[in-house]
């Protein structure tokens, strides 16, 4: 049965539906009938899996359709690729009535959404995430961006999609490591915002990794919770910043690995370190840290991996993070599982480098993630 959520931003007319069901790429009810010009943007892997079939379906409707693809992976999410794709769209004479379909994972969603935000000063687009990570995170909330040599997602725009189409059938072609990549982002939301969902995840971890029913429940819960958060804070002025938990360290690790480290995996290591920061500061109990670290261990996040990274380079990159203020990184701090520390409308805080260093070495020296 199809589930539908609506993202309706407070103090803003912006709203859009999220449709969740199997087979939505074959049933195109969600495509507005008035659209006559469609640009599908995808990567080379998704092109073979889904985009070519979608192209054939759309061509039968006699609409003007263009399919563009680029190499998969974070390395392609840059200004040069954005410019190249825009030039192709312009050369085919698509005007401001054109519609973009962002078909793929987070990289596709980010770059296609950013193109939509700037093409002809802004055109409409639909997010069609094909990875679990994109389903529970990047497709929702209107963040679009590209990377630079100085860091990830430093150039971009808030540009909301007309709708988000989540075809759960796409999960059937997802490798296990990419499933885990997305599950960590879902877990992040539960750690900061919903203890009950964390406990369900903890109790059903094996079924989630191996069974559809439990994983589908996790997906819906994560999407529902993220929708609740972004509707309260459209432009990340206060509450929405809690979604950056694990990302300050995580983005630095991604950059240092030259994006060989998957986003969700990098965030998993970021969660380990940033949770330890909260424990060192006397906010998070040792028992809660143990639960978090043990669950991450079951998802393959082993703390010894951190030893392969240079801490001073990590700290330097966090100071260039787009959330940094006056070259000081900001950290979301945990009070307990399901609840973050905040003061009035401040949800991210400065942390002394000595505390970050203490946390990093404490985690990387663990033989058992909870000790």
Image: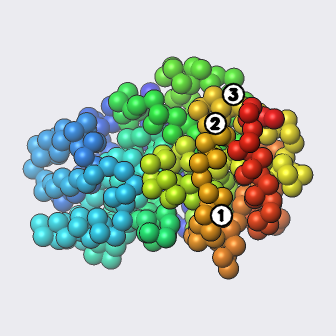
Q: Residues within 10 Å of mark 2 (few under 14, many from 20)?
A: many
* Left or right for 113, reference 192: left
**Can you identify the residue that label 3 sits on?**
202
Q: Tag 1's secondary structure? A: helix
Q: Residue furthest right?
A: 282
* Left or right for 251, reference 135: right
Location of the C terminus by quadrant is top right
Instruction: Give the mark toward the camera: 3 or 1.
Output: 1
Where residue 282 sits: x, y (%)?
90, 52
CA gap, disc 2 to disc 3? Answer: 17 Å
Q: Tag 2's secondary structure? A: loop
Q: Earlier in the sequence, mark 3 or mark 1?
A: 3
**Would you place residue 215 above or below residue 91 in this image?**
above
**Can you identify the residue that label 1 sits on?**
312
Q: Residues within 10 Å of mark 1 (few under 14, many from 20)?
A: few
- Circles 1 and 2, Cβ within 8 Å, touching? The answer is no
Which residue is found at the position 75% from the left and 58% from the top? 357
Location of the N terminus by quadrant is top left
CA gap, disc 3 to disc 1? Answer: 34 Å
Q: Residue 331: in sight, yes or no?
A: yes
- Circles 3 and 1, Cβ within 8 Å, touching? The answer is no
| The one of 243 and 59 positioned closer to us in this rendering | 243
**Can you identify the residue that label 2 sits on?**
302
Q: Earlier in the sequence, mark 2 or mark 3?
A: 3
Where residue 192 sits: x, y (%)?
71, 47
Instruction: Give the mark toward the camera: 2 or 3.
Output: 2
């Amino acid at each position: 049965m199809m589930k539908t959520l609506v993202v309706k931003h407070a103090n803003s007319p912006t709203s859009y539906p999220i449709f969740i069901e199997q087979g939505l790429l074959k049933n195109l009810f969600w495509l507005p009938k008035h659209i006559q010009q469609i640009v599908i943007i995808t990567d080379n892997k998704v092109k073979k899996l889904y985009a070519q079939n979608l192209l054939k379906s759309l061509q039968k409707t006699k609409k003007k359709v263009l399919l563009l693809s680029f190499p998969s992976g974070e390395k392609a999410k840059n200004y040069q690729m954005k410019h190249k794709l825009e030039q192709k769209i312009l050369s085919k004479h698509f005007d401001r009535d054109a519609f973009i379909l962002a078909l793929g994972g987070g990289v596709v969603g980010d770059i296609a959404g950013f193109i939509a935000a700037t093409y002809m000063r802004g055109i409409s687009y639909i997010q069609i995430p094909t990875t679990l990570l994109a389903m529970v995170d990047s497709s929702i909330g209107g963040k679009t961006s590209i990377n630079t040599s100085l860091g990830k997602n430093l150039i971009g725009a808030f540009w909301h999609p007309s709708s988000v189409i989540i075809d759960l059938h796409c999960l059937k072609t997802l490798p296990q490591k990419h499933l885990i990549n997305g599950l960590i982002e879902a877990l992040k939301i539960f750690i900061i915002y919903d203890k009950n969902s964390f406990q369900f995840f903890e109790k059903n971890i094996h079924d989630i990794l191996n069974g559809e029913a439990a994983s589908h429940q996790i997906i819906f819960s994560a999407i529902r919770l993220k929708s609740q958060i972004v509707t309260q804070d459209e432009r990340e002025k206060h509450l929405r910043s809690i979604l950056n938990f694990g990302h300050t360290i995580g983005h630095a690790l991604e950059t240092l690995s030259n994006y060989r480290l998957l986003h969700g995996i990098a965030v998993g290591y970021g969660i380990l370190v940033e949770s330890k920061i909260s424990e060192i500061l006397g906010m998070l109990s040792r028992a809660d840290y143990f639960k978090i670290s043990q669950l991450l261990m079951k998802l393959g996040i082993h703390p010894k991996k951190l030893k392969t990274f240079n801490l001073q380079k990590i700290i330097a990159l966090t100071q260039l993070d787009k959330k940094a203020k006056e070259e000081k990184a900001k950290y979301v701090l945990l009070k307990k599982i399901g609840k973050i520390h905040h003061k009035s409308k401040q949800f991210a805080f400065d942390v002394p480098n000595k505390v970050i260093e203490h946390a990093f070495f404490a985690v990387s020296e663990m033989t058992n993630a909870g000790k």
